[in-house]
């Protein structure tokens, strides 16, 4: 596995021009300036492909389904060229003992120099017997693969937070990866599923700069999780104006008003949905007429109904409160006028009052 990403592309007939275009577009998708394109090109030309073990615990495979739909870079480029995806029991050809032997081979041969990607989470109840891989608890496989890895990527809300498996009452005692593995750097890429381009961009960043991206206090890449969906939502102007959908398919819904009153969790959800969007930038849930359910936030399954309105969000309400603001202004003017009149009357009364000399009057 000394072949570089560029070597693979050349072998496949990709021109130098197309390769440089790929680097420029990928840098842009990472939020980097055009000056980083040459840096990315040099890294992909010189660095060997990175071995990756992709494990699956308790999950629905939606993260893998999202990953293979990335439009830039294409998942096929990431898997077949940029990475050396040595183990992924969902898409690999090998099965049984031959498949499980690959894990041991990578852990031994590339000790300290492979990435562990985890989709899903381990259950702790009954000694992990609620999720069995190759005849052994997934918990055991996870600990074994993690002990000598370079870093861990927790794909999706299952691996990052626990998701539906860890929702109350959590009979299997499912926990996120960081509750089991505590001595390795962990990059959390939450979402149910994460945005495909976010997944591939995180991998590309690590390959290019040989380090993990800058993370927020919860362990998420800042380049994609530093802003709320609400901050860049195209319906934000309607929120600020107090224009809301009151009922599904009402006139406000047809006009594209804000979905806050229908339970949209965009004001409390950190993700790139409103900017990167889905299906190659085509759309995202709010654009399709459904509020954000906050799937990339910790405990979103236990935070009440998806259609319950958030109660602690304060909007500007310029138009919705115009009458109220106007009435308040009029009242304030009235009070001020009355006060002014009272002060003037008192002053006039004082001016008209006889002046006392303090002695005998004549």
Image (cartoon, rainbow, N blue to C red):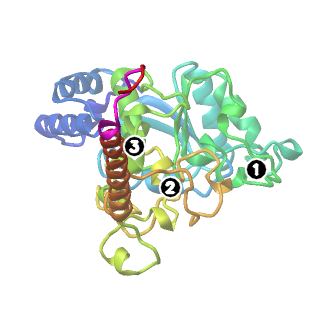
The secondary structure that dominates the magenta segment is: loop
SS type, badge 1: loop
Spatial CA span between label 1 and label 3: 28 Å
Q: Nearer the viewer, mark 2 or mark 3?
A: 2
Please tell me which of labels 2 and 3 falls first in the chain: 3
SS type, badge 2: loop
Q: Which residue is mark 1?
A: 131
Q: What percent of the width, then of the height, locates residue 138?
A: 73, 43
Q: Which residue is mark 2?
A: 265
Query: Which residue shows up at 40% across the image and 81% down it?
Result: 250
Residue 278 in sight: no
Q: Please state, as top left, top right, bottom left or bottom right, where the N terminus lies in the image.
A: top left
Mark 1 Cα shell of 10 Å, populated few (<14), some (14-19), many (≥20): many
Q: Which residues are magenta?
A: 350-358
Is 25 inside the magenta-drawn segment? no
Q: What percent of the width, then of the height, locates residue 52?
A: 51, 34
Mark 3 Cα shell of 10 Å, populated few (<14), some (14-19), many (≥20): many
Please say if 264 is above or below 23. below
Query: Which residue shows up at 38% across the image and 23% down it?
Result: 2
Please say if 152 is above or below 321. above
Q: In this orientation, which residue lies closer to the viewer: 123 or 267? A: 267
User: Would residue 354 be found to the left or right of residue 14 on screen?
Assistant: right
Residue 155 in sight: yes
- Indicate the quadrant where residue 147 lies: top right
């Amino acid at each position: 596995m000394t072949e570089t990403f560029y070597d693979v592309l050349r072998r496949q007939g990709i021109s130098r021009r197309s390769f440089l275009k790929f680097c420029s577009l990928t840098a842009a998708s990472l939020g980097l300036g055009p000056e980083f394109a040459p840096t990315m090109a040099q890294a992909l030309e010189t660095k060997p492909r990175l071995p990756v073990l992709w494990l699956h615990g308790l999950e629905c495979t939606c993260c893998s389904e999202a990953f293979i739909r990335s439009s830039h870079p294409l998942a096929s480029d990431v898997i077949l060229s940029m990475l050396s995806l040595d183990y992924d029991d969902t898409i690999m050809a090998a099965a049984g003992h031959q498949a499980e032997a690959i894990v041991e081979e990578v852990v031994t041969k590339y000790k300290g120099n492979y990435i562990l990607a985890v989709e899903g989470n381990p259950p702790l109840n009954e000694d992990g017997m609620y999720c069995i891989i190759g005849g052994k608890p997934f918990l055991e496989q996870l600990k074994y693969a993690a002990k000598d890895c370079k870093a861990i990527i927790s794909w999706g809300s299952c691996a990052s937070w626990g998701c539906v498996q860890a929702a109350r009452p959590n009979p299997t005692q499912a926990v996120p990866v960081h509750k089991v593995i505590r001595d390795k750097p962990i990059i959390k890429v939450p979402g149910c599923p994460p945005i495909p381009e976010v997944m591939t961009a995180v991998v590309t960043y690590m390959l290019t700069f040989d380090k993990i991206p800058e993370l927020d206090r919860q362990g998420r890449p800042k380049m994609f999780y530093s802003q709320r969906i609400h901050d860049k939502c195209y319906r934000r102007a309607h929120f600020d104006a107090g224009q809301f959908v009151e009922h599904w398919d009402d006139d406000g819904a047809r006009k594209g008003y804000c979905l806050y009153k229908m339970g949209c969790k965009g004001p409390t959800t950190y993700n790139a949905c409103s900017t990167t969007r889905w299906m190659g930038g085509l759309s995202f849930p709010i654009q399709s007429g459904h509020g954000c359910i906050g799937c990339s936030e910790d405990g979103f399954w236990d935070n009440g109904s998806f259609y319950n309105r958030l109660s602690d969000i304060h909007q500007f309400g310029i138009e919705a409160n115009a009458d109220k603001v106007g009435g308040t202004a009029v009242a304030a003017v009235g009070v001020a006028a009355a006060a002014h009149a009272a002060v003037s009357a008192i002053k006039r009364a004082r001016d008209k009052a006889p002046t006392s000399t303090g002695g005998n009057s004549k």
